[in-house]
Amino acid sequence: PGNPYVFDLNGKRYRGNLTFLISPDGGTFELINEVPLEAYLAGVIGSEMPSYWEPEALKAQAIAARTYCLDTKMRYGINRTWDVSPTQAHQVYSGISAETAQIWEIVNATRGKVLMCRDGSGAESVFPTYYSSTCGGHTEDGSNVFGESWSALKGVPCPYCREIAPAEKYQWPGVSYDLAEASRLIFEKYPSLRNLGEITEVTPSRQSQYDNGQFVRVLHVKLTGKSGQTGFLKAQDLRLTLDPSGQKIRSTACFIQVEGRTLRFVGGRGWGHGVGMCQCGAQGMARKGFTAEQILGYYYPGSVI
């Protein structure tokens, strides 16, 4: 588009340019929004956090989102025609509809600021600054969920999100699946597990426990099939295989039960993977007077801006 470089797509307006790229198979195409980083962030911050939240929470979100974008671009973008997706797979990006005057103030106030920490070799680098909606009381080590060994991705207690998160985000209702249907979904995604036969048991094989065992986050599960054989999955992979939307099984901070032919997820807490910054916790800290720097330093221990 010409000046002012705004275009419409599927009823939404975006800044920058639009590249229409036909895929090598000739049957599909990609639409790629080429946009400056700070303008991109203006469409992310208000999509990932309510724009009326405390300025210091929004600043923390802006710095985390900027860092996450650059880390993803540098690690994976070089191997594909785009850098980040506009969905929860990376960060939600809604273009101009997410922008407000306050959001632009936040973006400009943090312009160019990123988080860094030491990698395995001791060198400082940007890192994947994961964040999620509500941790439920304790964030999780990145190595336990994503296999990321960054020094700043360590789990910390979070007493701050309980007062901020709506009840349905802090604690979520039980979810049930028929074992036959659960088996079908798992085998579709992971064909190598078909040798188990229909799954009869799903049990945690590794989990983190907090609050004297009252708060459990399942990390890996053991699957037992009718054949008598067993297999293993990351709990996060199981969650998103059964519920790709993440709207029903809202986290792996829950108890997993099999009753007869029914697989149940009960006693759930939090929403999201629980690694890095807890967004509701950041708002809770901001309300108590913490600065963006203090919020980020708490959820990403040892990181520097």
Image (cartoon, rainbow, N blue to C red):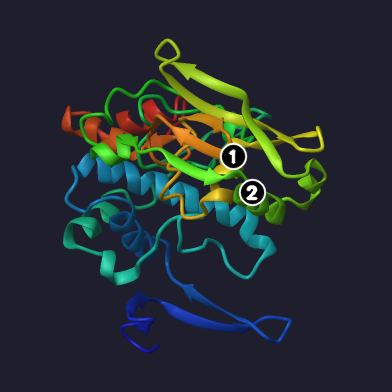
Q: Position of residue 47 (x, y in %)?
A: 32, 58
**Does residue 95 lie above or below 72 as drawn?**
below
Q: Residue furthest front?
A: 260
Report, in whole angstroms, how far the alpha carbon at label 1 lies from the one at label 2: 8 Å
Closer to us: 206 or 196: 196
**Residue located 46% across and 47% down the image:** 67
Q: Which mark is residue 261?
A: 1
Q: Quadrant of the C terminus?
A: top left
- Asked if residue 101 lies left or right of residue 145, the reply is left
Residue 141 visible to the viewer: no
Looking at numbered disc 1 in the image, what kind of residue is underneath it?
Arg
Q: Quadrant of residue 8?
A: bottom left
SS for callout 2: helix
Q: Amino acid at mark 2?
A: Ala
* Upstream in sequence: badge 1 or badge 2: 2
Q: Which mark is residue 15?
A: none
Query: Which numbered disc covers residue 180?
Result: 2
Identified at 73% across, 50% down, the residue is 190
Q: Residues within 10 Å of mark 1 (few under 14, many from 20)?
A: few
Q: Is residue 111 above or below residue 136?
A: below
SS at mark 1 in the image: loop
In this rendering, the answer to whether 269 lies above or below 73 is above
In this rendered view, identify the residue nearer to me: 247 or 40: 247
Q: Are marks 1 and 2 in contact (CB under 8 Å)?
A: yes
Where's the N terminus, which quadrant? bottom left
Q: Residue at x 41, y 17 (%)?
A: 214
Q: Is residue 104 visible?
A: yes
| Residue 36 x %, y % | 42, 67
For the view shown, which residue lies furthest in the top direction? Answer: 212
Left or right: residue 128 compared with residue 38? right
Q: Residues within 10 Å of mark 2 (few under 14, many from 20)?
A: some
Q: Nearer the viewer, residue 22 or 68?
A: 22
